[in-house]
Amino acid sequence: MNSFTFHNPTRIEFGADKERQIGLHLAEHGVRSVLLCFGSERIKRDGLFDTVRQSLAEHDIPFVECGGIVSNPVLSKVREGVALARAHQVGAVLAVGGGSVLDSAKAIAAAARHDGEVWDLFTGQAPVQSALPVFAVLTLAATGSEMNSGAVVTNEVTKEKFAIQSPHLFPRVSVVNPALMQTVSRDYLVYSAADIIAHSIEGYFTATVQPAFQSRLVEAVIQTVIETTETLLEHPADLDARAQFAWASTQALNGLTYAGTAGFSYPNHMIEHALSALFNVPHGAGLSVVMPAWMKWYHGRNPAQFTRFARQIFGKDTPEQGIAALEAWFDRIGTPTRLSQLGITAADLPALLDNLEGNARWFGLAETYPRAVLATLLEGAL
Amino acid sequence: MNSFTFHNPTRIEFGADKERQIGLHLAEHGVRSVLLCFGSERIKRDGLFDTVRQSLAEHDIPFVECGGIVSNPVLSKVREGVALARAHQVGAVLAVGGGSVLDSAKAIAAAARHDGEVWDLFTGQAPVQSALPVFAVLTLAATGSEMNSGAVVTNEVTKEKFAIQSPHLFPRVSVVNPALMQTVSRDYLVYSAADIIAHSIEGYFTATVQPAFQSRLVEAVIQTVIETTETLLEHPADLDARAQFAWASTQALNGLTYAGTAGFSYPNHMIEHALSALFNVPHGAGLSVVMPAWMKWYHGRNPAQFTRFARQIFGKDTPEQGIAALEAWFDRIGTPTRLSQLGITAADLPALLDNLEGNARWFGLAETYPRAVLATLLEGAL
């Protein structure tokens, strides 16, 4: 087990009606005006927008709207948010939405306090030295952004999907009310399940130091995601399953399962980021295609852990059987496992590989994943 | 799954030599003088005291010593610490030791900012409204105090062992260096294992709302404690086992396993507190006696969870077999399972029951655990 620092200061307010107190949380942090980030206009139709507006009004906190954030959020929108934040001199950013809205809000919060080019924060040319405080009301459990310090944004000009990470970007308060997730579509539920599993297995399989305790935490997350996804597909109104799904999602990427591990990498995310940057596929759908393909290529490097995965998660005996069981489970719940299901064909591979080479450099994985390896891997997923 | 707030702001600095930075952490929090709490003089012989002193000196932080804190820490020592803290107007309290030292440090930190009688903070007659910031260098993993907001102290006049809890009492920074725990005695290792398991099972068995995800987290802790204890008994120098043991201990009582559960109680701690208040037995040794006795009496109220425990932890089929397996494991590692092993006989039961009735009221469990029930339970443990 390696040395580490664990410090996750985010306050999670979990459960029914917690969004009604969001104004109070901002007020307690001394916020006097806020940039309100959201995605589609749906939150205006379903009442959530009004609930948040009323809570802010109760605490005399004016807000500026920054709506229209799309999934696989884009840099141009971040720039728009920064301009609004500066023009109105807001004291904080409040995200009301899923991971894309949260990540955009975090990027805006960091960029609003950064004088240079925003994308420099993502390429690593400039560090995040400060940020407006971030608050969130989560409506989709998948990315774990509500309790971590990272954000992923796509530069639609350069077609790069990169991340920033900074302790300044932990949300101060995140509301996680499973009832707000009851209307998530069937598709986005299963894509989210794939995303959470991807967050869990990246370190689990690739870490050179992976203590059994951390593996057990990861398995607790995956078992819960599998179990609750199946329940929700049959009974979408099952609030308890929705709640456990959401809390497992938060735990998958808040630093806990990675504490004490070392040498891990994020190859599945590295590959998927090229898919969504070029073809704008839903992140989770891309991941459920990438994971089985990557696992088939990789498992020989860590047979003990793949055997453990097969046994603990699926009651199988061999790495191959465990991987097949995961792929079959993705098929069963209806998240893609082939590039063709995403409309991507062999003709697209050269462009994909070009983009991937850039990602591999950004992720520091260019040596392990040269173009030939990536080609083999992707051809296996056609 | 119930609503909850999860907010654990403690920064954990885990790993080799982290205690060398303790002065830096205090300085970063603006601390200019500190009360240094510790137990025996051993830390002066083994070099830890010097390491801490040097780190404080590097950051020009003078300290006042408050040594001699004993296990099952006592109120008189807390009063002594408060007097020192006030006389020297220290800005923080630094605990260097195990759970007893941490709990005393927390009590001193709260009481130093409380004008009335200290014990009122424990009986609930006065709330903890403020506290000096608390820092810690942990030398024994067992109580979880390094990452939670509670503290337990014995009033040696009234023979009451009660707790305080307040968000003000989360340590700002806790150093957890497994290497500092390499010299823990065999006895204290197994008592600590029992303590961690007790923290894990109280909610696991008694909660009226206990989602599967939370049960899985608890099982991850217990499996890890069992596995690493066995490794450490055979190979006390195994630093990786020591590290996983320590991190599992921290996770057992930092709020994570309880998030979303409801209706739980702490009957094993309620009973044990009477044992250590009256007979000064090591807390973990008391708990390993109480747990099997309590489980035998209680399991019929929650057969599904006891069956789950038997299967997940010991690969057994029935509640009775699971309980027997835990008791046998305690016997095997050498932590007591009978009151007689603690020197407590039938003649002591009346006094024990008198004390327990007070505890039951304090724990809010007087209805579930009337004297007759407690008598049955303890007679089963003679």
Image (spheres, coloured by chain):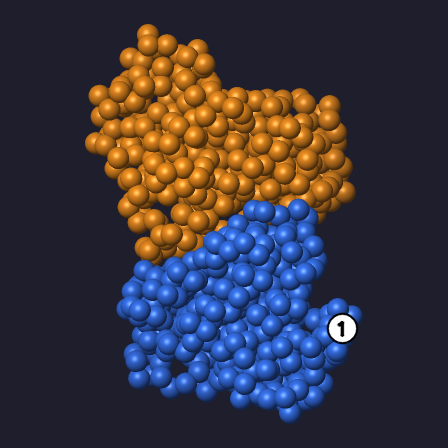
Chain colours: A orange, B blue
| Position of residue A371 in the picture relative to residue B151 (left or right) | left
Q: Quadrant of residue A276?
A: top left
State the residue at coordinates (43%, 76%).
Answer: B334
State the residue at coordinates (47%, 20%).
Answer: A336
Residue B87, x across and y down, in percent = 54, 85
Residue B206 appears in the picture as rendered: yes
| Position of residue B322 in the picture relative to residue A118 (left or right) | right
Residue B293, x across and y down, in percent = 60, 72
Residue B73, x across and y down, in percent = 54, 82
Residue B92 appears in the picture as rendered: no
State the residue at coordinates (66%, 29%).
Answer: A236
Q: Which quadrant would the C terminus of chain A be assigned to in this image? A: top left
Observer-nearest of B101 and A69: B101
Query: Badge 1 is on which residue?
Result: B366
Give the residue type that dot 1 points to: Ala
Question: How packed is label 1: few (under 14 Cα within 10 Å), some, or many (20 or more)?
Answer: some
Q: Output the chain of dot 1.
A: B
| Position of residue B67 in the picture relative to residue A232 (left or right) | left
Q: Which quadrant would the N terminus of chain A be assigned to in this image? A: bottom left
State the residue at coordinates (48%, 22%).
Answer: A331
Observer-nearest of B244 and B54: B244
Residue B261, x across and y down, in percent = 65, 53
Q: What secondary structure is marked by label 1?
A: loop
Above-or-below relation of A141 to A281: below
Q: Quadrant of residue A182?
A: top right
Above-or-below relation of B203 to A28: below
Point out the residue furthest to the top here.
Answer: A347
